[in-house]
Image (cartoon, rainbow, N blue to C red):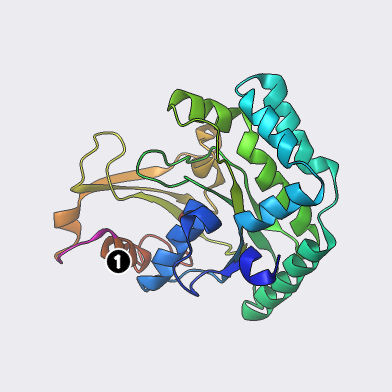
């Protein structure tokens, strides 16, 4: 399996969501819309399958997946990701691209390693907060972070989420975004549709100081975000599409003094 199948640089073209997952595909759309997105690449689902195939795990994963949502099956699947070494060719490709990423963003000393599952950020299910993403990862620790993202495909909350929404467990696969880390003074989480009322003419902006980890992980005990629901028509006097909405949001200086973090 060559590098072109396992690596997709964000912004190099519209990645296939079945290969790069929902989050990476969304980042591609943001770049295309002209938004400011920190440099990143995606380790595709082909890399995930490369790990499974290298260690003869494909049949076992199929068998244990068929037994979901049994807890023993879920735990076995998550454990498989930590049992065996990353294949040498995959490890080499990963670290080569991390070096390239560092050269493209020399001021960023740490990485954000972000899950991008197939079916994530879709109209039917967002999977918000269900899979693992790690911030502040040193380059030397990118492989453990990669494993954590892969294993979170079968986290208790992710399996429960699928079960509650009747999504099934077949065809599950995880891509992973490796991105230059932005240390924000203020972070915002933007909903382009009001998540409480479902109104499509309202956006909701939650903002808090720092990286907003509590907001994103739903640990509201650690953060008290400010919340602004507002009419899109009142906020923006321009014709809107979803992409132009996001582009405009990413340029709002009052939302964030140094960076806007959207997950």
Q: Is residue 170 above or below residue 203?
A: above
Tell me the residue at 64%/39% (across/down): 152
Nearest the viewer among 2 and 165 is 2
Residue 168 spot, x, y in % from top left: 50, 30
Left or right: residue 116 compared with residue 234: right
* Residue 78 appears in the picture as rendered: no
Q: Secondary structure at mark 1?
A: helix
Q: Quadrant of residue 179?
A: bottom right
Position above or below: 39 against 223 = below
Say if the magenta span includes residue 14.
no
Residue annotated with mark 1: 248
98 versus 203 height, above or below: below
Q: Nearer the viewer, residue 232 or 114?
A: 114
- Report the magenta residues as a range: 238-242
Q: State whether residue 147 appears in this view.
A: yes
- Label 1 neighbourhood size at 10 Å, few (<14), some (14-19), many (20+)? some
Return the x and y of residue 38 as percentages of the image width and height. 53, 69
Coordinates of residue 25 in the picture (x, y in percent): 46, 59
Q: Quadrant of the N terminus?
A: bottom right
- Above/below status of 155 relative to 204: above
For residue 110, side relative to residue 255 (left or right): right
Quarter of the view holding residue 2: bottom right
Query: Residue 226's spot in the image, x, y percent?
Result: 38, 44
């Amino acid at each position: 399996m060559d590098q072109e199948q396992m690596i997709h640089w964000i912004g190099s073209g519209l990645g296939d969501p079945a290969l790069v997952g929902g989050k990476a595909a969304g980042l591609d759309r943001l770049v295309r819309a002209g938004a400011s997105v920190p440099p990143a690449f995606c380790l595709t689902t082909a890399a995930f399958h490369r790990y499974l195939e290298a260690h003869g795990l494909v049949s076992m994963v199929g068998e244990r997946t068929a037994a979901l949502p049994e807890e023993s099956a879920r735990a076995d699947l998550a454990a498989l990701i930590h049992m065996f070494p990353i294949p040498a060719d995959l490890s080499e490709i990963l670290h080569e691209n991390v070096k390239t990423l560092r050269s493209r963003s020399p001021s960023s000393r740490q990485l954000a390693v972000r899950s991008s599952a197939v079916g994530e950020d879709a109209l039917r299910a967002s999977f918000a907060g269900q899979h693992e993403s790690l911030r502040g990862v040193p380059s030397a620790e990118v492989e453990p972070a990669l494993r954590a993202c892969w294993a979170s495909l079968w986290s208790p909350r992710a399996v429960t989420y699928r079960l509650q929404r009747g999504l099934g467990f077949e065809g599950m696969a995880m891509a992973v975004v490796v991105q230059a880390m932005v240390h924000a003074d203020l972070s915002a989480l933007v909903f382009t549709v009001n998540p409480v009322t479902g109104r499509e003419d309202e956006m909701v902006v939650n903002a808090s100081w720092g990286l907003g980890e509590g907001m994103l992980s739903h640990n509201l005990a650690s953060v008290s975000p400010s919340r602004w629901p507002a009419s899109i028509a009142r906020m923006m006097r321009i014709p809107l599409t979803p992409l132009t909405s996001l582009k405009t949001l990413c340029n709002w200086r009052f939302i964030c003094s140094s960076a806007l973090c959207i997950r």
